[in-house]
Image (cartoon, rainbow, N blue to C red):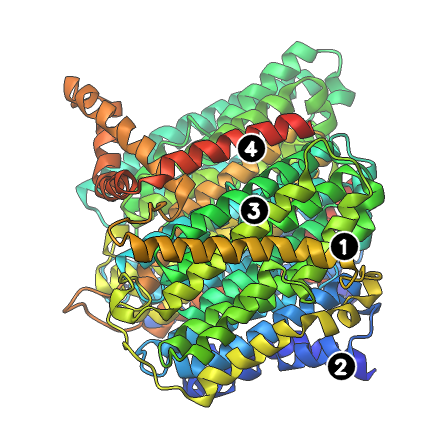
Amino acid sequence: MTAALLLATAIAWPVVLTAAFMVRRLRAAVVVLAPTLALPALALGFAGEPALELQVPGLFTSMRLGVDGIGRAFLLLTALLWTCAVWHTASYMRADPRRRAFTGFLLATGTGNIGLTLVQDTLSFYLFFALMTFAAYGLVVHTRTADALRAGRVYIVMAVLGEALILAGLFGITALATDATFAAVPDAFAVMTRPGLVATVLLLGFGVKAGLVPLHLWLPLAHPVAPTPASALLSGAMIKAGVLGWLRFVPAGEMSFSAAGITAMTLGITATLAAAVAGTLQRDVKTVLAYSSISQMGFVATGFGAALLVPTAAPLMVLAVAVYAVHHALAKAALFLAIPVAEGSRRPLMLVTAALPGLVLAGAPFTSGAMAKAALKSALGGETWPVPVDLLLSVAAVGTTLLIARYVSLLALAPARIPATGSNRGGQSSRELTVGLVAPWALLVALSVVGALWLPWVLAPLGELPLATQPAYVAGALWPVALGVVLAGGALLLRRRYPAWTVPSVPAGDVLAVVERAARTLHSVGAPLARIAPGHAAARGWYWLEARTGAGLDRAAAAYDRAAAGPALGAIMVILAVLLFLALR
Amino acid sequence: MNLIMASSWLPLLVLLSSLVPGLIIVFLEEERVQLRTALNITGAVAKIVFVALMLYGVTHGHTYAWSLPVMPGLRLNLVADPLALLFVALSAALWLVTTIYAIGYLEGSPNRSRFFAFFSLCVTATAGIALAGDLFTFIVFYEALTWATYPLVVHRGTPASVRAGRTYLAYTITGGTVLLVGIVWLYALTGTVTFVDGGFVEAAAGGAVTETRIIFGVLIAGLAVKAAIVPLHGWLPVAMVAPAPVSALLHAVAVVKAGAFGIVRILYSVYGVEYATLIGAAQVLAVAAGITIIYGSLRALAQDDLKKRLAYSTVSQVSYITLGVAIVGPVATLGGLVHLMHQGIMKITLFFCAGNLAEVHGVKKVSELAGAGRRMPFTMAAFTIAAFGMIGLPPTAGFISKLYLGIGAVQAEHTWIVGVLVVSSMLNAAYFLPIVYRAWFEDAPTGATMGEAPWKLLVPAAITAALSLGAGLFAAMPVSPLELARLIIQRRYGL
């Protein structure tokens, strides 16, 4: 009974806060209460009685709530991140004239994100997922700078595309399911005429949110412009909603989905490698972290793809994916929240502390990162793969280490030397270190660093995690990190020696930049054609389009032409993806 | 109580509740504002009470029928089956809110007696269309609707509205004539025009496949004018020069809905979806609806005039109804029928809000909407809910419609319809989200007037916006439009 009450409160409290925010007279009080948004959910996560279910018959299409094993892992990560980030926001936003509006969007987004971990039916999941997606637009465009608005446009276009694909998949499932519960999903797939198509559509639909390459292009644009707590939530918690969508909507383990599986593995492995390189070559610390997320989500996609291909490996894979999700959420949120703290203090102790979750992310021995990679590799190890997946993922870990080195070096730079972005333009050059700013960060760092101690407890309902302390795993975890550190040190020495060398850069939003460059070229073909018959409908359409998009494309094309490493990296990425696809096929 | 409920007079009372006030208002002087308002509101409330009584009776298994001999062999038949109630309930509920809105909107303007008289006649005709028990009764009211609406379209008397009125008449009279030809032909072939659940054509004239096919085409072509199916939709975007309450009436309550409802009747009570599919007619209709859905959305995308954008949106959205009933299977029909109501409450909200923007701040174009959310927070909140509904985002009513249409399409193995629905959702987002963005995320130009609409304009929009949200959020409740539509399906498919 108390558990049911806690479950109802966990989902009702964010709804109440969001609704109360709409009432002008209550707004001030709601902003004060906002950090309690996820506290009931957090309590539920820790109390977590798996298999708990609650039905609300009249609401929506008969909403079903509950906490199961997989739901609990995502509930905990979501509740932890939201609690810390909203708490952090109060201090971070102190001087912002629009902090109230920001809190409103935060509450609505949080309601969606927390809600989707608590529901047990596909339609309600879609409801909360959509709420989260559309409310988060307000977080992305908060600063209203040109960059933020552009990022918002890309975000919303991709979001609508994702929602539409998920909707198509939802039709496919609901049409054949006996009811809307997650439990009925496998049976629906069993009677489908084209289950592979539905699985692929859902993989891509949720892939937009999960940062699956090449649908990731909103991520590196949105993260640098959003206020830092929002970036932490986007990268830490909301990305994971896409992963949870995969696990809930596609019944890995029930049957083999070869098309979706090969797609996920190809794109996943490509992302782990290419995004690590692209991220290391960035000049904005938050863009670096955005690429790190894309790279890390590549690991998750690889694992999920393997589960789709080999049903027998699915239980272990799902476990690995869950570990990865929780572990990455904590580490990435800690890395983001360190940025405002670094604006207040750049003492070595602070920088070293800030780097710790980075080491966790790279998978240094005895961390939750090593545990997650061990889980992934042991699950993959049960099969023989036509490509050296193991080695490729280790190489990616070297890339992660380099990327983290880049992060720390950018963090250490004085703000004057950091290129202006939407997030710090016109902001304070140094921040006052208040408890509210530092404590949530410190808490996340601590939770992330000791993750290896408590994650097995969280994930116990899903299965036993492989012991990451075995010598083979320790060695396997150590060498990529060590090599990465050595390479980063070498790069630092080279730069000291030859200060004139500049690092080649990749335009943020890589694939999008290519698309925009191509669109610009098409435009220049269109201009002379339109002049032939200016009155023709096609020509008028061209002028209409040109007036709306021409200037933006010009800017994008110029940025693309400046970014030297973009085309090379893009070409390598495409070749890699094609080779992986051909090998896995 | 039982006596009232079982009374066969109820269908007639539903008609009279708007006909009588309408006829009295014709003879009322212009300045008798209070009496006119009292008549309008009393009529509208009475209609809702009568409909509610019938609703109660029909959900308990009763069917109401009333009949009047016109000449030997011809009778006006009013029948309240669940399908009729779905439409009459929608029009009765929306008539009340539209009346309140119209009273506020036209405050102090000339020719209000004429306006409200025809307004009432218009709703009477709509109720007649809904309750018609056969095709003869149907076309009588269908034609009456054309004539009752014309004075409303040209109400302002400007050259543009006179032109729009002429276009409207040219389209609808032609459509009505074609429909009449179809009905007479069908009568000649089958000897009956009385609606039967599941259709009567197959039983009466199943052998003459080619002829039934052609008649189907003629009937649908006649109805497609009001239902605004491409390429017969041309009158609708032109008619948007009419005052906002008339637009609401055209798009949500009466005219467009009458066309769509007629198509539903043809498929549901004349041909039967199964027979229409057997002769290949339903598939053609579904494709036409699919084309209309995409075409309307594409055209909406390019409109800067807010009401024109909404008009093309109607072209697109109304064809969801046709699409749903043209697919065999209970779930698709459910999606189409429930959208008959959902589209009504969502689109009327949008037109109310567009009217408020134009009336209070003179904002008529999408490009002038910057900061509208700050200028009229409640109006734009209502608009936003309805716009999200049109896109089909959960938990709005629009999501429920789209969900059942999608499920129905998959169950009938029409995968292409899933494609139409998905593409259309994206297009809807593409033309509604920029409006929402401008209103809430852009700053109002300096010197812009601020201030919310008066309550008579605001309350109707708030009510229909709440309905648009509630119909989705509480879709599983017994009184939701979804459950009402389910009642029809259960009767038809014996579930």
Amino acid type, label 3: Thr
Q: Which one is nearer the viewer's eye here, B332 or B181? A: B332
The earlier-in-sequence mark between 4 and 1 is 1
Disc 4: CA contacts within 10 A as few (<14), some (14-19) or many (>=20) = many
Q: Provide residue B21's location: percent of width, then percent of height.
A: 45, 60
Amino acid type, label 1: Ala
Name the residue located 68 percent from the left edge and 32 percent from the top edge: A259
* Chain letter for the residue marked with disc 4 in the picture: A
Q: Residue A120 bears which disc, if any?
A: none
Q: Vertically, is A209 above or below A326?
A: above
Q: Which residue is mark 2?
A: A5
Determine the image quadrant of residue A461. bottom right
Q: Which residue is mark 3?
A: A272
Q: Vertically, is A585 above or below A159?
A: above
The earlier-in-sequence mark between 1 and 2 is 2
Dot 1 and dot 2 within a common chain: yes
Q: Which one is nearer the viewer's eye here, A200 or B203? A: A200
